[in-house]
Every structure is written in structure tokens, then in C-alpha cells.
Image: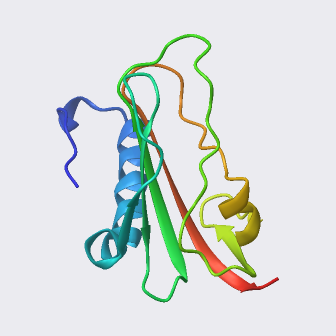
Amino acid sequence: MGVGGDLARWSEDELREAAGLVAEHNNARHLVQHGRLDRLPPSSDDTPSVVQYTSPDTTETPLRAWRRTSRYGSPQLALRLRGLTPMALYRDARTGTVHQAAALTEYGTRLDLPPGDRSSAAVHLIRETEA
């Protein structure tokens, strides 16, 4: 992962935020390198590109989403995840929210990208137990 910008000019808050984002990336790096890659919905200029990486044993699945441009009123699409253990529960590592795998694969989830152009989001789901 690369961090662009003049770090000497960043505020303490910006440096803290960047350090947290790098730590999140490092926690999922092994899956980005060695996990199964799925590109989720087809993207266009105003819909996000989303990739899902899944560990071979399906215990973890990080998602990365980014959008080039944003148009007012563009719909947030539900993303149907792939390759999860069907009866399992998955916890969002950042928020602690627990999701049922069946709901994630059948109905999907929404990634809340920040407003504006060139926005991105990352989610890391970790399998908890069988439902």
C-alpha cells in the first residue's frame, strides 16, 4: 500500500487517520495476496468498483470499494458477497456489527462510501460461528 502526499504537511489528525488505514490494510494483506479474488458488480463511471478477497477456509473476507466519480442521486447498490460459509455469522472488524452469511450472499450489504469523487471504503468481515 502506498500513501501519497507530503506527510510533513499533514495535521496530527490526518497522520492518525492514515496510520489507522495502513494498519487496517496490513491486517488484511495476507488475504489480498493469497485469498480468492472476486470482483463484485460490474462498474461504470458512477458506480463503485468492489473487490472481495476470501481466505481458503472462508474465515475472513475483506472488501475494498472505490468510486472514480459521484453523481447526485446515484443509487447505492446492494453487494451480494460470494464464497461465505452458508450458516455462519460474520463480524465487521471495525464496527462489531454481526451479519448472517445467508443474508450477505442472498440480499447483500451496502458499503457506505463517503460522498464525492475518488472515495473509497474498506470492510473486513471475520467468521464468528455457525448461526
Q: Does residue 16 sit above or below 68 in this rendering?
A: below
Image point (46%, 51%), residue name? 40
Quadrant of the rendered structure where residue 37 is?
A: bottom left
Q: Left or right? Give the position of 60 relative to 50.
A: right
Q: In x, y percent, where is residue 89?
A: 74, 76
Q: Does residue 88 sit above or below 115 in this rendering?
A: below
Q: Does residue 105 sit above or below 131 in this rendering?
A: above
Image point (44%, 22%), residue name? 46
Image point (71%, 59%), residue name? 106
Q: In x, y percent, where is residue 86?
A: 69, 79
Image point (57%, 10%), residue name? 72
Q: In x, y percent, where is residue 93?
A: 60, 66
Extreme-right residue of the structure:
131
The quarter in which the N terminus is drawn is bottom left
Q: Left or right? Give the position of 2 relative to 102.
A: left
Q: In x, y percent, where is residue 11?
A: 36, 32
- Total label count? 0
Residue nearest the observer in this picture, 18 or 100: 100
Q: Left or right? Give the position of 41 relative to 86.
A: left
Q: Does residue 114 sit above or below 105 in this rendering?
A: above
